[in-house]
Image (cartoon, rainbow, N blue to C red):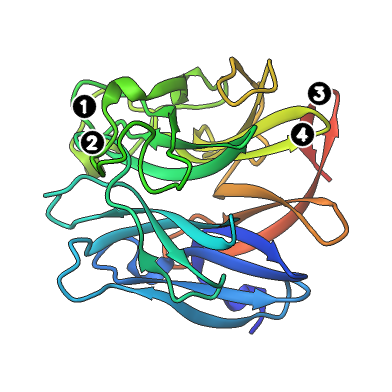
Amino acid sequence: MKRTDINIRDPFILLHDGKYYLYGTRSATCWGPADGFDCYVSSDREEWEGPIEIFHRPEGFFADAFYWAPECYEYEGKFYLVTTLGTLDNSRKKGTYILRADSPEGPFDIYSDRITPADWTCIDATLYIEDGTPWIVFSHSFEDPGSLDGDYCLLKLADDLKTAAGHEDGTPADPEDVVTLFSASQCPWATPVPFAKAEFGIDGDCFFSDGPGLLEINGTLFMINSSWSGRGYAVGVAYSETGRIAGPWKIQEEPLYPENGGHGMFFRDRDGEIIFTLHYPNDKYQERPIFVQVKEENGTLVLK
């Protein structure tokens, strides 16, 4: 199938043994009942095999919705799918879970219980290994009471990726385990979500934090993040002033991708070129993955 035939949100690419593996949120089930994840396989990023179902909800499994933003990583000989799961009735808030397989095409099995704090609404975790230590960066949503601002948060994992560090008993992380890196409202280009009242029943100016993604380029650690801009869903760039995952983080004044597309990630292709992928447009059930080359210029990233 053609790239333009793939209807997913939140695209993520794993390059393994010379092939590109594409993962994402099924557009058709993004906003209602959901039960699985797929991947697509390609040699050229234009012609794809798939969808290949890599995980299907087992009978009795709690998660019946919010199968969002799966990201696949090879780690110590296994493949790990870092993802968001939740329930339609909100009996369990959306949180980060990890699945595991022997192959990037699965089948994946449930590996971890909830990793992020149980009382927080957490989405879009991304994995980063620094000096052999695994971390996730995730979004703490503005949906939780007491905050109108989405945060980008850092949490250390146990070496086996199964729990948060210090929670090897399988319990979720505690809020004090989490470090807030920056908030969506700190992005100079971000604007309040115009549909916060209609969709979430929340009054006031709300800023949402979506889709962090990380890549080190020539010694500089960059993060992309999605939020709302004056022109719709958009993707911005920040960089760590220390080159370390804990920051502090400096946010680029202008968005990298300013309108109607979002939740992207960086990867390197077979030639070592840096590629940015995101879903576009952001219109429900019309989303497609697109691929754009990027370059570093004057200390930041721009689209080629």
Query: The disc labelled 2 sits on which kind of residue?
Result: Lys
Q: Inspect the image, locate mark 1, and give the three-letter code of the amino acid beneath it.
A: Asp
Mark 4 and mark 1: span between their CA atoms?
35 Å
Is disc 3 placed on a helix, strand or loop?
loop
Residue 287 visible at all: no
Q: Quadrant of residue 187?
A: top right
Instruction: Estimate the x, y position of residue 267 in percent, counting from the top left.
Output: 71, 51
Q: Which mark is residue 215?
A: none
Label 2 sits on a secondary structure element that is helix
Q: Which mark is residue 301?
A: 4
The image quarter containing residue 142 is top left
Dot 1 corresponds to which residue?
A: 203
Q: Earlier along the polypeptide chain: callout 3 or callout 1? A: 1
Cα distance in 3D space between marks 2 and 4: 34 Å
Q: Amino acid at mark 3?
A: Gly
Residue matched to label 3: 299
Q: Is residue 275 visible?
A: yes
Q: Are marks 1 and 2 in contact (CB under 8 Å)?
A: yes
Mark 3 or 2, which is nearer the eye? 3
Judged by depth in the image, the label closer to the viewer, 3 or 1, is 3
Which residue is under mark 2? 197
Mark earlier in primary sequence (4, 1): 1
What is the spatial separation of the Cα atoms under label 3 and label 4, in whole angstroms? 7 Å
Q: Amino acid at mark 4?
A: Leu
